[in-house]
């Protein structure tokens, strides 16, 4: 009888530790949501590009502005992938989220820094 009781206690402890580890490492991580306003980031970069193009006096300056736009087009998808890895969360576009979930992290400022915006 003592053996059965001790085995039951050990089994309960192992199950409790396994459930706790699952909750901390898998379940809570899956509940984390990062929200990004990609439209805002795109509009800011577009305004920067427009300003550079309108103030440029030479073809070389226009080419530099176009090169900046091409770099941004390459950086944005990579930066979005990095966001997901950095926060270990699901990253969604702000317009795809209804309301304001209580556990949502706003990652827009971090995305702006990753693509070189203030």
Image: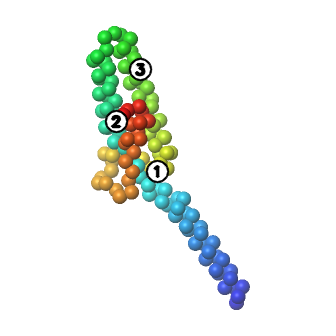
The disc, 3 or 2, on the residue closer to the chain's N-terminal end is 2
Instruction: Estimate the spatial distance between the alpha carbons at disc 1 and disc 2, rounded to whole Å.
Output: 20 Å
Position of 86 compared to 105: left or right?
right
Q: Residues within 10 Å of mark 2 (few under 14, many from 20)?
A: some
Residue 4 in view in this figure? yes
Can residue 92 be seen by looking at this rendering?
A: no
Give me the residue at 52% from left, 59% from top: 26
Rate crowding at label 3 as few (under 14), some (14 to 19) or many (20 or more) other CA atoms within 10 Å: few
Give the secondary structure at mark 2. helix
Q: Residue furthest top?
A: 58
* Number of numbered discs on residues: 3
To which residue does mark 2 refer? Answer: 41
Q: Position of residue 65 (x, y in %)?
A: 37, 19
Tag 3, which secondary structure?
A: helix
Q: Mark 3 and mark 1: span between their CA atoms?
A: 32 Å
Judging by the rendered image, the residue that carries numbered circle 3 is 67
Percent position of residue 83, x then y? 46, 43
Where is mark 1, residue-wise?
89
Q: CA separation, marks 3 and 2? A: 18 Å
**Which quadrant holds the N terminus?**
bottom right
Q: Which residue appears at 52% of the width and 64% of the height?
A: 23
Residue pictured at 41% horizontal, 49% vertical: 34
Name, please, the residue furthest toward the left.
Answer: 54
Mark positioned earlier in the residue sequence (1 or 2): 2
Residue 21 x, y percent position in the rendering: 57, 64
Please identify the quarter of the rendering in which residue 46 is found.
Answer: top left
Residue ranking furthest to the front = 118
């Amino acid at each position: 009888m003592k053996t059965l009781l001790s085995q039951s206690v050990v089994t309960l402890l192992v199950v409790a530790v396994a459930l706790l580890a699952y909750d901390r490492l898998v379940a809570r991580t899956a509940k984390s949501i990062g929200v990004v306003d990609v439209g805002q980031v795109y509009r800011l970069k577009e305004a920067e590009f427009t300003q550079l193009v309108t103030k440029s006096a030479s073809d070389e300056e226009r080419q530099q502005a176009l090169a900046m736009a091409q770099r941004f087009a390459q950086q944005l998808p990579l930066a979005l992938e990095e966001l997901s890895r950095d926060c270990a969360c699901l990253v969604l576009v702000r317009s795809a989220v209804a309301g304001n979930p209580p556990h949502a992290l706003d990652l827009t400022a971090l995305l702006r820094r990753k693509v070189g915006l203030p």
